[in-house]
Image (cartoon, rainbow, N blue to C red):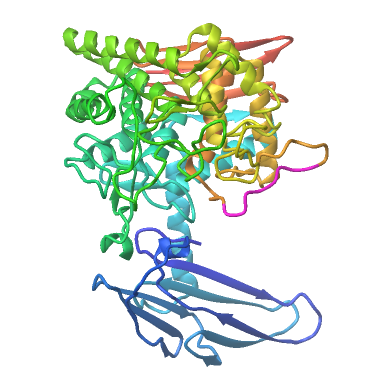
Amino acid sequence: MGAGQDRRCYERLTFTNYGRDLVMAPVALEFDADFADMFEVRGSKRIARGRRSPARAAGRSVAFDYVGLDNIERGSVISFSEPPGRLTANRADFLFMLSSEDRFELYLEIGPVLAPAPCRERWRAAAAQARLDMRRRTRRGARVHSSGRLFNEWIQKSRADLALLTTELDTGPYPYAGIPWFSTPFGRDAIITAWQVLWIEPGLARGVLSYLARHQAMEISAFQDSAPGKIMHETRRGEMTTLGELPFGRYYGGVDTTPLFVALACAYAERTGDLDFVDALWPSLRKAIAWIEDFGDSDGDGLIDYARGADTGLSNQNWKDSEDSVFHADGRFPAGPIAVVEVQGYAFAAFKGMARLAERRGEAELAQGWLARAHQLRDVVESRFWMEDQQFYAMAIDGQGKPCEVRGSNAGHLLFSGLPSPDRAQAVIQTLLAPDFNAGWGIRTLAQGQPRYNPMSYHNGSIWPHDTGLCAQGMANYGERDGVVRLTAGLFETAASFEMRLPELFCGFKRAAGEPPVAYPVACLPQAWAAGSIFMMLQACLGVTVDGWTGAVSVTQPRLPIGIDRLEIEDLPLGAARVDIRFHQKDDQVEVLIVRKDT
């Protein structure tokens, strides 16, 4: 089990003899510490590394030491509750004698420094603290409970995973992206995760917005892909980033993070009515919207675009950030700067949201300007991205002004922002729900039959639960419910195949009778925005919106997930009040009751 603030791992191994005879059980544990940087683990090559000292074995512990090229000393110590019969630098050998029904417990601890010998009391104290921390985290916000046992397991596992990944920072709770590759603050991931649970747990959005505002860029740096007002993409604290071998110590190479930051802040304000927080955040929001209007549109064509500043940065800087995720219909990679379609939607939502907030703050001139900017952006997107022959939006516009006429799930995010006209939105919805996109488990990132389509790729045909969730919420925004319910069923059945825990992504093979979804081998598990997807899917099904300004909860065309005839939301935050809402399937209708409201 993992520990908390003391940066230690506590482990208990229990050996029990269920036989009738005396058993002598030899047990060998092998271990090592190479102090490899996370980017080395992921495949980056280094010309030189620091100095690793010989391991030091002493009685019941082994210590490993490493001095990096950054002159920082790093250490790791593994300790045992019992002295091994034989202990070397990389192996501990034990011999346990167990009578019938006898039981023996061996305790291990791993930490940066030597501590008191592991024992039952230390393990129990750490386990109790971990349980208390998890209980406190999972009790934030509203609780959701349904009539379906397995569906409840999915809800509970997702809530527990979000709690596990959320770290308490001095700015508030912040969800780290995923284990093992992305256990660190990411901008885009945290914003979307916070948005997924905004309706039931708005406090997470407040923590995310506070942290990102504090780390907003202040200078232009090609190496960091930063410019004043831009919001952070990710931050790392390893040796390679400390030395500047890679730019990810604090990296800003995400074109979508800044408009998403602004849009989430506006959504948070509408959900909570927390104008005091908006006022405190207003300078950061002004800087961020200025980045969108200035640096975000590098070539002055009215679209928000990206082009990396240095070869060490990400070549693609939207959420599909692998090198081959943006391309033309003939498979060619586009010349930059590149304007991807979903980012225009995020910026549209940011401008509209800022206009509403400015009007509420009494800044009418700013409100009119941002509203005009939103309308201008909508007109540009509708005229330049729409593919009339395919009744769908192009994935991107390249640096030469040519559209990448490829059908990707990016257009579903455009629905989420509310940019498309109603007629075009319905065309996109039907395309996303058709078999080329909908594999039966969720929506593929790229439609089957498109160039570079590969259901086993990272972004070109795989299925990402958060992507499906954003598309589903976008459909719900335009009145679609049947398709959302079917998509929810597909993700639920996927979760059931992965022990009720949705992975970061899985392969986009077509669903076949009797066959489970195919796992993506190196997906993060758990992943924050995968865990959060169930809550966005539920909101899309139930049609719930909360107006923090008026203190009203609205429910529009509610539908329950397949197989669920009753669902309850308890302690839904509504200003200073708490509300309980019950949904009940009765014949072909869903009844909605407010069963409690505390003020």
Instruction: Report the residue at 53% width, 25% height from top.
Output: 405
Instruction: Report the residue at 34% width, 38% height from top.
Output: 307
Dominant secondary-structure state across the stretch colored magenta = loop
Q: Is residue 484 visible?
A: no
Residue in front for this viewpoint, 251 or 495: 251
Q: Position of residue 361 (x, y in %)?
A: 19, 13
- Looking at the rendering, the stretch of residues picked out in magenta corresponds to 515-522
Residue in front for this viewpoint, 299 or 532: 299
* Vertical relation: 61 (above or below) 312: below
Write down the quadrant of residue 591 in the picture: top right
Residue in front for this viewpoint, 15 or 52: 52
Query: Is residue 165 rendered to the left or right of residue 278?
Result: right
Query: Is residue 312 rendered to the left or right of residue 531?
Result: left
Which residue is most to the bottom? 86
Instruction: Report the residue at 38% width, 11% height from top.
Output: 379
Q: Position of residue 486 (x, y in %)?
A: 68, 24
Q: Position of residue 354 (x, y in %)?
A: 27, 18
Residue 598 sits inside the magenta stretch: no
Instruction: Report the residue at 28% width, 29% height from top.
Output: 296
Query: Is residue 490 rendered to the left or right of residue 7?
Result: right
Residue in front for this viewpoint, 172 or 577: 172
Q: Position of residue 385 (x, y in %)?
A: 46, 19
Write down the quadrant of residue 584 in the picture: top right
* Vertical relation: 290 (above or below) 79: above
Q: Is residue 451 visible?
A: yes
Count the numbered circles shown. 0
Dividing the image into 4 quarters, which one contains the C terminus? top left
